[in-house]
Image (cartoon, rainbow, N blue to C red):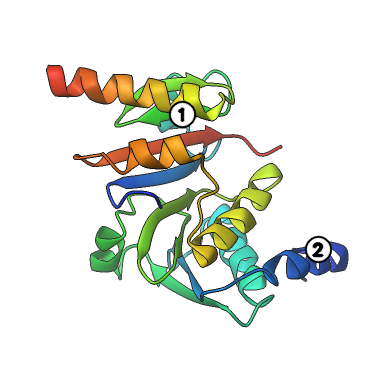
Amino acid sequence: MESDKVTADMVEAMEFPHLSQRYGVMGVPKTVANGKGVAEGALPEEYLLANIFALIEKEAGS
Amino acid sequence: MALLNDSVRTEVQKRLKELVNPVKIVNFTQKVECQFCAETRRLMEEIADLSAKLSFEVYDFVADKDLARKYRIDKIPATVIVGDKDYGVRFFGIPSGYEFGSVIESIVMVSKRESGLGAATKKKLATLAKPLHLEVFVTPT
């Protein structure tokens, strides 16, 4: 909602086992950003944000 | 038979009194519905009935493939919470247990145009130059 660039999906892990397997979901909630895991478990907002932006910077650099 | 019992219905109705702007619940299923597709559709229909500010639309994943593409739906059951525009909020699979609350929260957020995120987070997200696709995997609890 804070950016038109963001799409946020809730995915029910049991119903889509192929996706859970692809991302190696061992614990929930597991957060995946642009196809890469960024958090396992419920992280405080600032940590989750930091992980997401670390990934974005890495993507921009590669 | 209804999926939501009277006490849940009353509770949700109370929460939905906060709605400001209309919200559209867009559901994708298929002609021969999978078990969770049918349940998700019925659940969303029942939620939509609880407030005059809510509307409900159901589409077929195969027959309405152009719309599915527009909403970037690649699997079903899928539910999109739409305000005056698509804010990118999607639920894949049946949102039961704790996630039922997440659906209600999302509806309220989209209706109020308020994500509830901190000021620093909002500022950072506003700087995004490229698409960011977040997927949060959950289990029914």
Chain to which mark 1 belongs: A
Residue A13 visible in rendering: no
Question: Does residue A55 lie above or below B61 as drawn?
Answer: above
Question: Does residue B100 lie above or below A16 as drawn?
Answer: below
Looking at the rendered image, the quarter that the C terminus of chain B falls into is top right
Q: Residues within 10 Å of mark 1 (few under 14, many from 20)?
A: many
Please, what is the three-letter code of the amino acid marked with disc 1?
Thr
- Secondary structure at badge 2 equals helix
Question: Does residue B53 lie above or below A3 as drawn?
Answer: below
Quote the CA–CA distance across marks 1 and 2. 29 Å
Residues at circles 1 and 2 in contact by the CB criterion of under 8 Å = no
Please provide percent x and percent y for residue B91: 49, 51
Q: What residue is at 66 percent from the left and 77 percent from the top? A: B51
Q: Residues within 10 Å of mark 2 (few under 14, many from 20)?
A: few
Residue tagged 1: A31
Q: Is residue A42 left or right of residue B114?
A: right
Q: What residue is at 49 percent from the left and 26 percent from the top? A: A46
Residue B131 visible in rendering: yes
Please, what is the three-letter code of the amino acid marked with disc 2?
Glu
- Secondary structure at badge 1 equals strand
Residue tagged 2: B11
Please provide percent x and percent y for residue B92: 48, 48
